[in-house]
Image (cartoon, rainbow, N blue to C red):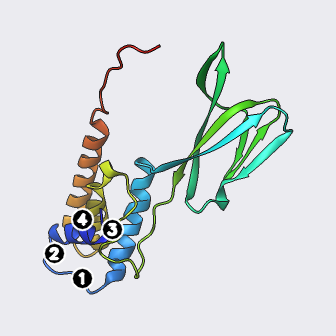
Amino acid sequence: MTYGEVKESILKLGYETSTDEDGLFIDGINRALRFINVEFPLTATYEVTLNGTDDYETIDFSAMDDFDVFLKATIKKSVGGRMQIFPFADITVDDSIVKYYEGVSGTVTFTYRTRPTMVTDTTSDSDDLTILYKAEPLLPLLAAFYIWGDDAPDKAAQWKNDYEDMKILIKGEPQNRFQIVGGI
């Protein structure tokens, strides 16, 4: 979804012309992006292969440009001749610092929530916004609530209610259903 599409959708919610205060659009859209990204996170992964001999190792996720919050870790290791993935708990997490300990071998995948790219006054209408695809319909509703909450409280309440209803529908949608037949 582009910045221009979001602005157009916001305006179609009840305003025929663009506001002269682009700062309101920017602030409202950024607040909505941050809020939506908590419930519908964009995620990334970081893999480390452990050989079981290191005393401990530290990863500073805050050094990553897109890091927001650490979510989970899994480890892939051979058990009984088969590669399996398990939750990985041999770590200490302190905000954005992750420390893992000696004696562990396997490939550890750290999953974290990424920060959305914020809209600025240099963002063009053709720039894509960072939001999970299925959450795109929520963005104009929540941004409009933030933008015009003080000026049109009745409309803002309706947009917030529409946002909550849409969020429930999106979360209630069944995930891709498929059946795997055969295999080893």
Q: Are marks 3 and 2 in contact (CB under 8 Å)?
A: no
Front-lying residue, 53 or 90? 53
* Residue that badge 2 annotates: 15
Mark 4: which secondary structure?
helix
Q: Amino acid at mark 2?
A: Tyr
* Residue that badge 1 annotates: 19
Please state the horizontal and vertical placement of residue 149, each as a whole percent of the image.
29, 70
Residue pictured at 27% horizontal, 57% vertical: 160
Query: Where, by quadrant of the figure, is residue 71 drawn?
Result: top right
Does label 2 or label 4 sit earlier along the sequence? 2
Compared with residue 12, is residue 132 higher up or lower down, i.e. above or below? above
Query: Where, by quadrant of the figure, is residue 136 drawn?
Result: bottom left
**Left or right: residue 100 compared with residue 148:** right
Please state the horizontal and vertical placement of residue 14, each as a whole percent of the image.
14, 70
Compared with residue 95, is residue 73 higher up or lower down, i.e. above or below? above
Q: Amino acid at mark 3?
A: Tyr
Whole-Å distance between the Cαs marked 3 and 1?
14 Å
* Residue that badge 4 annotates: 156
Q: Amino acid at mark 1?
A: Thr
Q: Are marks 2 and 4 in contact (CB under 8 Å)?
A: no
Mark 3: which secondary structure?
helix
Q: Label 1: how many residues lie within 10 Å, few (<14), some (14-19) or many (20+)?
A: few
Residue pictured at 32% horizontal, 40% vertical: 171
Q: Amino acid at mark 4?
A: Ala
**Left or right: residue 131 compared with residue 164:** right
* Residue that badge 3 annotates: 146
